[in-house]
Structures are given as structure tokens and as C-alpha cells.
């Protein structure tokens, strides 16, 4: 119902632990790994549809033979485009000699993407940047096999400026100031140093150069490289990397902000951003897939050993709750149950909003991603009704008649499919009025599902961020049904602060909760609060991020949660609407009850898990005050 929020990306890493011939013999195809990677990426397409990329490394190739393949796409269907591109070579081989598709030695030498180590990535374009150059995986090439590095991640770092300056100080000349390039070069720098150190140790021992690099591949200390490279990273990340000789890793941030899950057996080792995609791809139970521990790296060596290793000491676990509310696929057993609880916990507020009048209230959901929380809300209403039925039957005692019993037993919450989303409508007309009219018809409604001027209409959504779509489209559409009252329920709390760890919510002006608080301050003659927060924010600009405080919290301190919600409803109610409108938000307390193992709530509370978060919210508020329409990181 709210405007679409874009998530940065998802990752999929796959290592085949057996020779390719094994998979050909057992599964009938030499493309077992490629097919599994395709499935892992398709099952995570919710995490990025603006671009994708795939990299592959072949083990034990001879000098002069290509051992790294990479292809990236920003096609309208990037995953399909990538695998169509990869399959073109196999179609060509099939036309020339079909038997060669069963010859793994021929394939490794003559076709790309036929190696044992795969890395896939999906992304949404952020702040207008959606070029091939912005697509992962990123590649750092070198003639020495152990110095080649491929990196892809689900992350945002808040201190790119600091990290960039460090690279410049050590003599590098990065091609751009982005967190991806900075991460690539930071890991690459310490990879180079590790190579040089090992070379210095091995050369005096009399090894030939070719032998030295074989020994380096065996002895390279990935744990040390990652510790040195990531020691000053501030942000949320699940970072995946491949080395040219065949080692691989996935590193997770110390707070566990960004998710990562893994599985291994004697055939494969696999990592993905979401657990159920691994379950689906390899037909597993949820307990067989492990969560990568915050602050740890999963290190997969060329010899096939897999080990989870401490890299950065874990801090307080503040895993992103927005993953659970909105982004991640709802078929994860834990996420499904959490979304059910999110719906259940808003029931008392909903009942208050409709005056406990279930006989004259209709319940529905928009959009489809809110369906699970809708089920939770209905289960909560059923529990309430059952308690009410029990009390009514008990009160009537032995004098109850069949008619009375029937009337009590058959009470239920009225559920309807209210809104239907049509295909995207397109127009060449550019005038605002015409465009708004078109937007207002993206959804259609089920006419006759609501008793006109008598029923309350309650609809639940995952979250309400900006509220633009709600104001321009949804409320007007729902009002066509002539309900007495429209109650919009958000399964997430009020989004008050920007995210800076991998979700595209970056500007203060994008949040309807912030706009509501500013409106309340102005209405009540409290504009001095706005100026005071601005003054405090400006005074902190040159402080180290570790010393910066989030004074933007003071914008909200004068008002109750309910006052802000009421102002939001007022701001989002379009003119000429007949029904009364109330907007209900999940409380932070009930969010924590619903998602007890994912307590990262900084977009709701302003309690950032890293010092860089306070720096970002500080800058975001200054940008808003100074009229700068730009991201704060």
C-alpha cells in the first residue's frame, strides 16, 4: 500500500566439492552447479531486479587457460539474460558435437562458467545509479593467480570517506569513491601483502616461482586478510569473495545486520541471503541450514574444507527487523511465524479503532506481501471472538436456547478480497493531473464487498513509509466502496529515521512520520525545536563518528505515538473523501515481541547499531534543513 522500498541486493555462493565428472555421473549433467546457482538466484529475485551478475572460477587450470568468467546484466530481466548468455556457448557446442556436452575436460577448457566455484548477485539500483559498472560481482585481476579477487555483497558502509582516505594514504589510486570499490581494494591490498609476505618466506627456501605460488595457494591466511581489511568497516554487510586459486569466503558484520545462511555436505557448500532458497534448491529441512554467526566468516578452502571463523568480535545482535517484516521471502518458517505475530499484535488497536464492532467491519490486505500478517490479524480476531463467545455462553448458562447458541457460535470476522492489482498502466501523457488519475486506477476493487455507509473497512499493509501511493491511489479507491470508516494498519512501526545499512530509505523528507512530527511542531509553536536540533547537528559535523549523537530524536519527543499517527492520517487523507480515515501502526514493543531474535529497529527508534548510523542521521537532517535532495551516505 505504501510506496515500494528497494532492498540493495542478495548473494548466492556455491562451491562444488567433487570433480565435475561426479555430478555428470550422478545427476546426468555437467551443469549441475550452474543450474543450482540459477535456482538460488531466481528464488531471491525479490532482493533485486535492476541488475544481476555471475562469476565462476575453474580449479586447477593450466597457465594460458582461462579460469575466471564473469557476466553482468541490467536487462529488464537480468537473471534470465545472464543465463541465456551463458547457455549460448553450450548451444553452440551442442550444434557442433552434442557428445562434447558430456565431456567435462573439454567443457572446462573450451566453455566459460564450467568451473567449481560460483558467485551470484542481485541488486536494486540506488540513487539513480544503475549501470553495468555498478553491478556486482566486482573483479580485481592480476597475472598471479592467488592475487585475483572477485567480490559481491549485500551491504552499505557508512564510513566510505574514511576508508577511501586510508587507501590513498597507503599509495593507492582508487577509480571511484564507492563502498564496493573501497571494499574490493581494501581486501585486495591485504591480499597483496599476504602474497608478498609468503613469497618472502618461501623464496629463500629454494622453491621455483611456479612452486612458490602453489605453496602460497595452500598457505594463504584468509582469516588474517579479512581481519585486517574489515577492522575499520562501519556498516551492515554480508560480503562474499572468491580468490583466483579457488578459496572463497562470506563475511558477516558484527551486529548481524545483513543476513546470511549456509549449508554443506560432501557434494556442495552453499551460502545465500535467505534460508528457504537453500532449502528449495537442495531439498533440505530448515534445521539443516545454518545462520552465519555475526562477526564471523565462512571460509571455504580450495581443498574443500569449510569452517566458520571469528573475524570481528560480535557486538549486540541487532539483526535487521525490516528483513522480517517486508523484504525476505515469507516462506521461511521463522519469518512466517513472525509475520503472523505482527498481525496478531495489532488486534487490540484495531478493535479500539472499530469500536469492537465486528459485525459491521470487513478485513482485507494490500499488497500481497502483507498476506501473512493479515492471517495473523485474523487469527488474533478469532481468538478475541472465541473468548467473547465463551463468556457469552457461560453467562447464559443452562438457560441457553438453540437459537441463542447458534447466534453466538456463528459470529466471525468478515474477510473479503478487496483490492486487485492490475498490470502496470503506462501513458504518454505527462501532465500531473492525468498521471495521478492513472495511478489511481492501478488497483481495482471488489464492488459490493462492503455494506455502504455501514461497514468499517480495515486493510493491513507491511509498512507505510512515504504514504504517497496511499494518498494518491489506495484511499480514493477504497472510498469508492462507501465504507463508514477506513482503518489502515501497518504491521511495522512508524519509520522515523533513515537506514544506512542496505535499504534504500535515505532521506528525512521521505518519511511521512517525520513530516507529521514537523507539522505538529509548527502547529504548536515549537519551531524552536527544529532549529535547536539543526544547531546541534551542525556542531557535530566535524566530530569523529564515535562522538556523534542522534539529536533528531528530539523532533519526536514532544508527542505521543498516537498523536503522530493521527497527524499522519490527516496528512494522507485526500480531499473529497467521504469515509473517516484512521491509521494504526505497530508499536516497537510488539515488534520486539513478534521478532525476538531480530531486534534491529533503528529506522523506528533511531538507535543505530554502529556509530556511522548517528553520523548518517545527523547528515540527513542537515540536508533536509538546507534543502539538499541527496543521500546522507
Image (tube, rainbow, N blue to C red):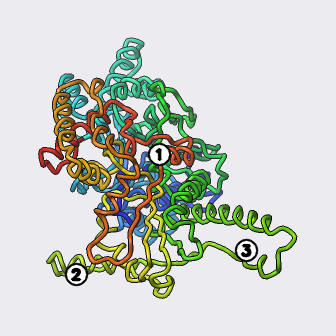
Query: Sequence-wise, which precedes: disc 1 or disc 3?
Result: 3
Q: Nearer the viewer, mark 1 or mark 2?
A: 1
Crowd band around label 2 with a 10 angstrom C-alpha radius: few (<14), some (14–19), many (20+)? few
Residue at 42% over, 25% down: 216
- Residue 409 appears at what percent x and percent y? 74, 74
Element on which disc 3 rests: helix
Q: Nearer the viewer, residue 622 or 207?
A: 622
Q: Nearer the viewer, mark 3 or mark 2?
A: 3
Q: Is residue 32 visible?
A: no
Residue 283 falls in image quadrant: bottom right
595 to 189, vertically: above or below: below
Q: CA distance from mark 1 to mark 3?
A: 35 Å
The quadrant in which the C terminus is found is: top left
Q: Nearer the viewer, residue 18 or 385?
A: 385
Q: Nearer the viewer, mark 1 or mark 3?
A: 3
282 to 95, vertically: above or below: above
Q: Which residue is mark 1?
A: 588
Q: CA distance from mark 3 to mark 2?
A: 52 Å
Q: Which residue is mark 2?
A: 427
- Residue 568 appears at what percent x and percent y? 33, 58
Element on which disc 1 rests: helix
Q: Is residue 166 visible?
A: yes
Q: Which residue is mark 3?
A: 408
573 to 313, vertically: above or below: below
User: Left of 523 or right of it: where is 627?
Assistant: left
Q: Residue furthest top?
A: 204
Q: Residue furthest right?
A: 398
Q: Tell me whether the residue at label 1 lies in contact with that at label 3, contact meaning CB atoms closer than 8 angstroms.
A: no
Q: Tell me whether the residue at label 1 lies in contact with that at label 2, contact meaning CB atoms closer than 8 angstroms.
A: no
Query: Sequence-wise, which precedes: disc 1 or disc 2?
Result: 2
Amino acid at each position: 500500500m505504501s510506496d515500494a522500498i528497494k532492498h540493495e541486493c542478495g548473494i548466492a555462493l556455491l562451491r562444488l566439492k567433487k570433480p565435475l565428472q561426479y555430478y555428470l555421473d550422478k545427476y546426468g549433467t555437467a551443469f549441475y552447479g550452474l543450474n543450482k546457482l540459477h535456482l538460488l538466484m531466481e528464488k531471491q529475485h525479490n532482493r533485486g531486479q535492476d541488475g544481476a551478475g555471475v562469476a565462476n572460477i575453474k580449479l586447477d587450470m593450466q597457465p594460458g587457460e582461462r579460469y575466471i568468467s564473469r557476466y553482468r546484466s541490467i536487462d529488464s530481466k537480468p537473471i534470465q539474460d545472464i543465463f541465456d548468455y551463458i547457455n549460448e556457448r553450450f548451444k553452440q557446442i551442442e550444434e557442433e558435437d552434442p557428445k562434447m556436452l558430456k565431456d567435462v575436460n573439454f567443457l572446462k577448457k573450451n566453455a566459460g562458467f564450467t568451473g567449481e566455484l560460483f558467485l551470484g548477485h542481485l541488486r536494486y539500483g540506488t540513487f539513480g545509479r544503475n549501470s553495468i559498472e555498478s553491478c556486482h560481482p566486482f573483479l580485481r585481476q592480476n597475472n598471479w593467480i592467488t592475487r585475483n579477487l572477485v567480490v559481491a555483497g549485500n551491504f552499505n558502509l557508512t564510513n566510505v570517506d574514511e576508508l577511501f582516505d586510508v587507501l590513498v594514504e597507503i599509495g593507492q589510486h582508487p577509480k571511484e569513491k564507492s563502498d564496493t570499490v573501497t571494499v574490493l581494494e581494501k581486501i585486495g591490498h591485504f591480499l597483496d601483502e599476504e602474497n608478498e609476505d609468503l613469497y618472502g618466506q618461501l623464496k629463500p627456501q629454494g622453491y621455483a616461482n611456479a612452486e612458490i605460488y602453489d605453496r602460497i595457494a595452500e598457505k594463504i591466511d584468509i582469516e588474517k586478510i579479512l581481519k585486517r581489511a574489515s577492522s575499520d568497516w562501519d556498516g551492515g554487510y554480508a560480503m562474499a569473495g572468491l580468490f583466483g586459486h579457488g578459496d572463497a569466503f562470506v563475511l558477516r558484520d558484527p551486529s548481524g545486520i545483513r543476513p546470511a545462511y549456509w549449508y554443506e555436505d560432501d557434494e556442495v557448500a552453499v551460502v545465500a541471503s535467505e534460508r528457504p532458497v537453500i532449502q528449495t534448491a537442495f531439498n533440505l529441512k530448515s534445521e539443516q541450514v545454518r545462520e552465519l554467526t555475526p562477526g564471523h566468516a565462512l571460509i571455504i578452502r580450495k581443498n574443500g574444507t569449510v569452517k566458520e571463523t571469528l573475524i570481528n568480535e560480535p557486538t549486540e545482535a541487532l539483526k535487521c527487523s525490516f528483513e522480517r517484516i517486508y523484504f525476505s521471502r515469507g516462506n521461511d518458517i521463522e519469518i512466517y511465524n513472525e509475520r503472523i505475530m505482527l498481525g496478531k499484535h495489532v488486534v487490540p488497536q484495531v478493535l479500539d479503532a472499530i469500536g469492537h464492532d465486528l459485525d459491521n467491519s470487513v478485513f482485507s490486505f494490500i499488497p500481497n506481501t502483507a498476506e501473512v500478517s493479515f492471517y495473523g490479524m485474523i487469527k488474533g480476531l478469532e481468538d478475541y471472538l472465541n473468548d467473547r463467545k465463551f463468556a457469552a455462553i457461560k453467562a447464559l448458562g443452562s438457560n441457553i436456547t438453540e437459537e441463542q447458541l447458534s447466534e453466538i457460535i456463528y459470529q466471525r470476522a468478515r474477510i473479503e478480497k478487496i483490492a486487485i492489482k492490475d498490470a502496470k498502466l503506462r501513458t504518454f501523457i505527462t501532465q500531473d493531473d492525468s498521471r495521478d488519475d492513472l495511478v489511481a486506477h492501478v488497483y481495482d476493487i471488489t464492488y459490493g464487498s462492503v455494506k455502504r455507509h455501514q461497514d468499517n473497512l480495515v486493510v493491513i499493509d507491511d509498512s507505510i513509509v512515504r504514504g504517497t501511493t496511499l494518498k494518491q491511489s489506495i484511499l480514493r479507491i477504497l472510498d469508492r466502496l462507501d465504507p463508514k470508516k477506513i482503518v489502515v494498519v501497518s504491521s511495522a512501526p512508524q519509520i522515523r529515521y533513515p537506514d544506512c545499512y542496505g535499504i534504500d530509505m535515505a532521506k528525512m523528507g521521505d518519511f511521512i512520520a517525520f513530516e507529521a512530527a514537523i507539522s505538529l511542531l509548527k502547529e504548536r509553536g515549537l519551531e524552536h525545536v527544529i532549529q535547536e536540533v539543526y544547531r546541534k547537528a551542525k556542531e557535530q559535523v566535524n566530530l569523529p563518528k564515535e562522538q556523534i549523537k542522534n539529536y533528531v530524536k528530539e523532533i519526536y519527543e514532544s508527542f505521543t505515538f498516537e498523536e503522530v499517527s493521527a497527524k499522519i492520517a490527516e496528512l494522507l487523507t485526500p480531499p473529497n473523501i467521504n469515509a473517516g480515515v484512521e491509521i494504526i501502526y505497530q508499536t516497537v514493543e510488539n515488534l520486539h515481541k513478534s521478532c525476538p531474535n531480530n531486534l534491529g529497529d533503528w529506522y523506528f527508534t533511531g538507535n543505530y547499531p554502529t556509530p556511522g548510523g548517528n553520523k548518517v542521521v545527523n547528515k540527513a537532517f542537515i540536508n533536509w534543513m538546507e534543502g539538499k535532495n541527496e543521500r546522507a551516505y
